[in-house]
Image (cartoon, grey):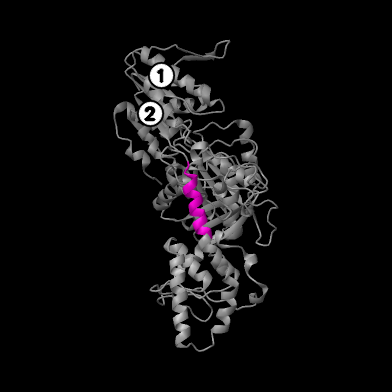
Amino acid sequence: MRQTCIFSGSSHPALVEAICGRLGQKRADVTLGTFSNGETRVEVQTSVRDQDVFIVQSGSGQINDNIMELLIMIQACRGGSSKSITAVMPYFPYSRQSKKKTHRGAITARMLANLMYVAGVNHVITIDLHASQMQGFFKCPVDNLMAEPLLSKWLRMNIPDWPEAVVVSKNPGGTKRVTSMADALKLSFGIVTTDRRRATGMGSMQGSAIFESMGTDGTNDHSALEGDAEDAEGRIRPMASSREYNFAHQQRQQNAPRSNGDVDGQQRRTSMHRAATAGFSPTARTRLNTLNGNGDVPASPSPLSRLTRPESAGTASSVSDGVANLSLLRTQTAPGIEQPPHDSDGYEEAEGEHDGDERARDVITGRLIQGHIVEDDFPSPSLSVRSGSIQGGVGQRGSRSSEDEPLPEPMMQSFMSTTSSRMQALQHGLGGTGDATASDEEEEEALKDPYIESTVTLVGNVKDQPVLIVDDIIDKAGSWIAAAETVIKRGGATKVYCMATHGLFGGDSLRELDMCEEIEAIVVTDAFPIPEEKRRQTKKLVVLDVSGLLAEAIRRNHHGESISQLYQHFD
């Protein structure tokens, strides 16, 4: 190609050589190095005046050095009067930091896009961004190519029974990517979700929170608070002292005929009770009526009924031993609410013969301990999240007590007392979405933690079928192994193929994937450089070449041709 210069960074020189070989062009000369103090040094040795410059730089183990090389090369070519500058980035660095996961987090991917624009880039070519919405971060055109046609071509040529395969996503975030491949190949798809067992949260703030009144000067109005407490105690104390009598008296009066005098006495007691509970809310008044037997809901001394009373109404010790053997009454709903029909075995009847959801049989659950599937009777860890000792990243292992919890700030003390410190909000991402909370690193750490038991759910029928677990990045091996064991041991699949665009393989993840007996092959592209020593660790690794895809994108971009055909599937 005339009027074109292709430069290579230090991240992936082998890929640049393959691209230049396909285009029949020699790589432009550039000197890359560092000064004695560690600063990056770039010297362009080729004239770029009025040239279409393409700088190929992917990620690698020295990701920050690669970014600085790219920015300096862009600035150098801009200063050399180049016609256009296109950054070819097969793997876009910091793509997993494309949204704020905490209130003090940074959107690093957007910051990198701004840096490239300030340096002088005119166009960006990349492959499979972690989130397609990242294209909005750039102030220049972005061509987000897809490796899906390459992966689809490989499975059609190497998996004999691929028409019966099921494409599975190992987390809900990759569902869109999985459904895209399933629709292109006309295959079924499934989803594997992993969730930690959490302790049951408090259903209402009224259990421990004490909302204080604020005076006109901005301080707490303690006099109003003490007055409200005395009024509430004066109303509840007579009721709590008479509960024992009410429980036993109601049992004696259930079968006895009522006279006119009894009816008048009941009406007087009801009027007095209404006057005593006039200051309570409708919900609290209903619970007090249930507790004292003065409402439509029958009273019961069972533990189930005591759970519905306010905590300040008394303790379980006030109930005498004489009424402990009373029968347990069925809880009734409010008047006007129709209960669903029940058959003889206690289950709800279906509305029609074909109203049952047949797809419910395709939902399978299992238990994960240290990232591996275990049997249902396997003992749980001694320190489980279900016991409340670990909850959503709160503190270290061990039980939490109110003495270890920090006191609220003075501003918060004017609205809520320290007795509400037990009320802990669930850890969600910004805006209440769970997908913004847990990153891949946190998920992998939770799977490796021996003190945390996770619940895995498989949605989809994979029995006696090969499974393709598809994602954009393979970094840690924990979630991939957990998904593979789930579809094999719980779902009954025959084989598992792990397929992704970028094979980062951090740590010993490639060796761990190779040791997993359920995984048949690991298929990735060479968009991210894989060292030769890692490739020699396993025989299951299959690396697909993306130089043809990038070379064709460069050629079409230089000649002003459409690149829509690069997204299509070919046999």
Residue that appears at 64% across and 54% down: 387
Most frequent secondary structure within the magenta stretch = helix
Q: Which residue is mark 2?
A: 124
Which residue corresponds to the image point at 61% horizontal and 31% vertical from the top-left? 532
The answer to whether residue 315 is visible is: yes
Residue 152 in percent (x, y) is at 45, 46
**Which x, y percent locates residue 230?**
52, 55
Q: Which residue is mark 1?
A: 74
Is residue 10 in view? no
Of callouts 1 and 2, the N-terminal one:
1
Residue 223 inside the magenta-drawn segment: yes
Let me know if residue 378 is in the magenta part: no
Q: Secondary structure at mark 2?
A: strand
Q: Quadrant of residue 303?
A: bottom right
Q: Work out whether residue 2 or residue 307 is closer to the camera in this orientation and state it.
A: 307
Residues drawn in magenta: 220-233
Image vertical order of residue 105 relative to residue 464, above or below: above
